Image: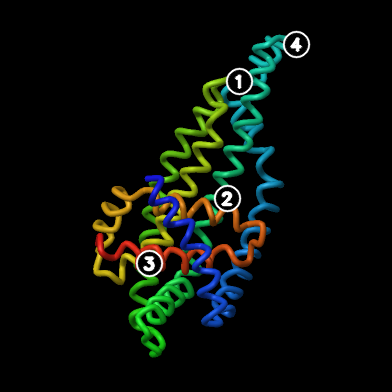
Amino acid sequence: MLKEIVIAIQSWGEAHRFILQHKLWKWVLIPGFLYTILFITGLIFFGESATSVVEYITHILQLSDWSQQFQNSLLGFLFTFAGIIFWLTLLIFYFSFLKYICLIIGAPLFAYLSRKTESIIQNNEVNPNWPSVRSEAWRGVKMALRNWAWQTVYLIALLLLSLIPVVGWITPLIVLFLECYYYGFSMVDYGLARNGYSGQQSVEFIGRHKGLALGNGILFFLMHLVMPFAPAYGIVAGTLTAHKVKSNL
């Protein structure tokens, strides 16, 4: 898996040079602008609703009664810290939901950019045709929904785990790697689709090569330092990654 993660990370550096060389900036900035708006909107919504959600769940599980009962004790501290861990896990959960909205709305742009990248690699100067782009965009939407459904199942279980003192402290890290894996999965899938892989075959391939998805997703999270570039860079890097491993397809 480590070798595959390195391959995916190297593809991000190659994606930067590729975008510069072939002047693909408009296909970077358009989805980037859309993603930035969605991201900021999501954070505002989270800031307004997260506290209410935490208080509601705390009330349902009667955690406040437990924490007051053990106030000024080690157990009280553990319950308080568990609440912080739960909040962090919930933040990543919100971010996950936002991410998939971006994947679904931006699917036509992502499909076009991925196909454009592939055509340049193959020295084909003909612009991608829109019927093919529509087909791959719909494939991207279905894959995003599939990944969102599975990730939500895992996240709900991890949210409950985060409420357990000590044991749940590692939950945000697990959720973060889960996020990286599924986002990288969606990015790489655009390249796999054009190599004749069905949705199920793509799932099986990524299942055997988890490092490719994980490495791509890790760089996506780091790219939030320059947020507008993250989605398009992920698509180009994912397409380059799929092209690299084409001999294994």
- Distance (Cα) linking label 4 and label 3: 54 Å
Question: From the viewer's perspective, is 5 left or right of 229?
Answer: left
Question: What is the secondary structure assignment of the residue under circle 1?
Answer: loop
Q: Residue at x 67, y 38 (%)?
A: 52
* Quarter in which the C terminus is drawn: bottom left
- Distance (Cα) linking label 3 and label 2: 22 Å
- Percent coordinates x, y for residue 33 in the rendering: 63, 70
- Distance (Cα) linking label 1 and label 4: 18 Å
- In this figure, which residue is indicated by the disc labeled 1? 62
- In this figure, which residue is indicated by the disc labeled 2? 95
Q: Residue at x 62, y 62 (%)?
A: 38
Q: Residue at x 44, y 52 (%)?
A: 6
Residue 190: assigned label: 3
- In this figure, which residue is indicated by the disc labeled 4? 72
Question: What is the secondary structure assignment of the residue under circle 2?
Answer: helix
- Distance (Cα) linking label 4 and label 2: 34 Å
**Foreground: disc 1 or disc 4:** 4
**Foreground: disc 4 or disc 3:** 3
The answer to whether residue 237 is above or below residue 97 is below
Instruction: Kindly identify the amino acid type of the residue bearing the numbered disc 2.
Output: Phe
**Foreground: disc 3 or disc 2:** 3
Instruction: Kindly identify the amino acid type of the residue bearing the numbered disc 4.
Output: Asn
Local packing at callout 2 (Cα closer than 10 Å; few below 14, some 14-19, many 20+) is: some
